[in-house]
């Protein structure tokens, strides 16, 4: 199955649905909204507005998709070699929304949608870059490597280096995936978020038995499984890397169904067998954390502390 086609395999369709539903909650540029607010009340308002915009965007995808079928796929102006019976969209399937804007509103609407698309790309890239650089400089370098002993100047330096490195990696991957369907690739990115971040978030909020060790191991298992599933799928193994057709080790187009299951199982198993002193503290602190999460009581004091 090519990345530009519809997902017809039932398991692939279920995996894609899980990735799009639960991956949204685990996207780093969504989670970063919790770290850019002054208090718990502002965090709730920020998440409320973000959820509304995300829901609005998901509704628009249906409208844009059906609109492109009606106005773009039937108009020879937007098709390559329509006289010969070929119906490929000019510029590839990623141009469907842009062509639809031109078909509905002419050049003015085309220019507006193009500007919106460009601004959206900048917003997403900046958010991902910021969250990635922050994770590397603060979470990995300052907390794990330096064990809290790093100074602010070193963190800023590492953050700048990480920003450049992440930018270079993104450019290389962008060139490699140039011909891929953007919507399909978004599903793969969502599957990674749904497999790594979402299970940890959900279990930490809803299960009193989760421990730090279980969260770390389970989250990494979900991340590694999702990454391997994406790389070994036909969309990357064959279409990007260039291996022969039919040689992809992973037979489905999206790994979320399997990687999410492994992540949840890993969190549960390694939390159950964790009898460390840290695990006892994690379990003892669940009630207070649960009250804060459901009511907001005590969240301001915890944030200030």
Image: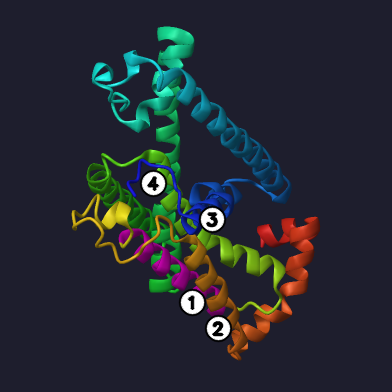
State the residue position of label 1: 217
Q: Which residue is mark 3?
A: 14
Q: Where is residue 9, by image quadrant?
A: bottom left
Residue 287: % across, % down: 77, 72
Residue 27 lies left or right of residue 47; in this view the side is left
Residue occupying image coordinates x 38% and y 72% = 145
Secondary structure found at label 2: helix
Determine contact: label 2, label 1, CB under 8 Å: yes
Q: Residues within 10 Å of mark 4 (few under 14, many from 20)?
A: some
In this picture, residue 161 sits left or right of residue 291: left
In the picture of the structure, the residue carrying the numbered disc 2 is: 270
User: In front of the other: label 4 or label 2?
Assistant: 4
Measured along the vertical axis of the image, is residue 258 above or below residue 71?
below
Please identify, in this view, whether the residue under mark 4 or under mark 3 is nearer the observer. Answer: 3
On the image, numbered disc 4 is attached to which residue? 185
Q: Is residue 148 visible?
A: no
- Between label 1 and label 3, give the one nearer the viewer: 3
Magenta stretch secondary structure, dominant: helix
Q: Nearer the viewer, residue 36 or 53?
A: 53
For the magenta stretch, what is the residue range?
213-231
């Amino acid at each position: 199955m090519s990345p530009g086609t519809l997902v017809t395999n039932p398991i692939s369709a279920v995996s894609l649905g899980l990735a799009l539903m639960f991956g949204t909650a685990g996207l780093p540029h969504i989670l970063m909204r919790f770290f850019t607010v002054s208090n718990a009340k502002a965090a709730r308002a920020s998440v409320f507005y973000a959820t509304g915009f995300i829901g609005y965007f998901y509704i628009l995808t249906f409208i844009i998709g059906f609109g492109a079928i009606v106005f773009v796929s039937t108009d020879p102006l937007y098709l390559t070699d329509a006289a010969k019976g070929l119906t490929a969209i000019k510029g590839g399937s990623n141009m469907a929304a842009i062509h639809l804007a031109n078909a509905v509103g002419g050049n003015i609407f085309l220019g507006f949608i193009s500007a919106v698309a460009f601004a959206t790309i900048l917003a997403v890239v900046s958010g991902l870059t910021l969250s990635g650089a922050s994770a590397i400089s603060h979470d990995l370098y300052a907390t794990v490597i330096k064990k809290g002993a790093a100074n602010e100047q070193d963190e800023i330096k590492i953050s700048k280096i990480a920003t450049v490195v992440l930018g270079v990696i993104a450019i290389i991957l962008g060139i490699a995936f140039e011909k891929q369907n953007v919507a399909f690739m978004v599903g793969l990115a969502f599957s990674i978020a749904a497999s790594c971040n979402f299970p940890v978030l959900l279990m930490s909020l809803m299960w009193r038995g989760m421990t730090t060790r279980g969260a770390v191991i389970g989250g990494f298992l979900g991340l590694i499984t999702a990454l391997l599933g994406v790389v070994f799928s036909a969309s990357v193994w064959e279409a990007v890397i260039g291996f022969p057709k039919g040689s992809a080790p992973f037979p489905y187009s999206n790994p979320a169904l399997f990687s999410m299951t492994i992540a949840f199982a890993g969190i549960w198993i390694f939390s159950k067998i964790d009898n460390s002193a840290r695990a006892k503290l994690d379990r003892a602190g669940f009630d207070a954390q649960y009250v804060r999460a459901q009511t907001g009581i005590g969240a301001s004091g915890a944030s200030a502390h």
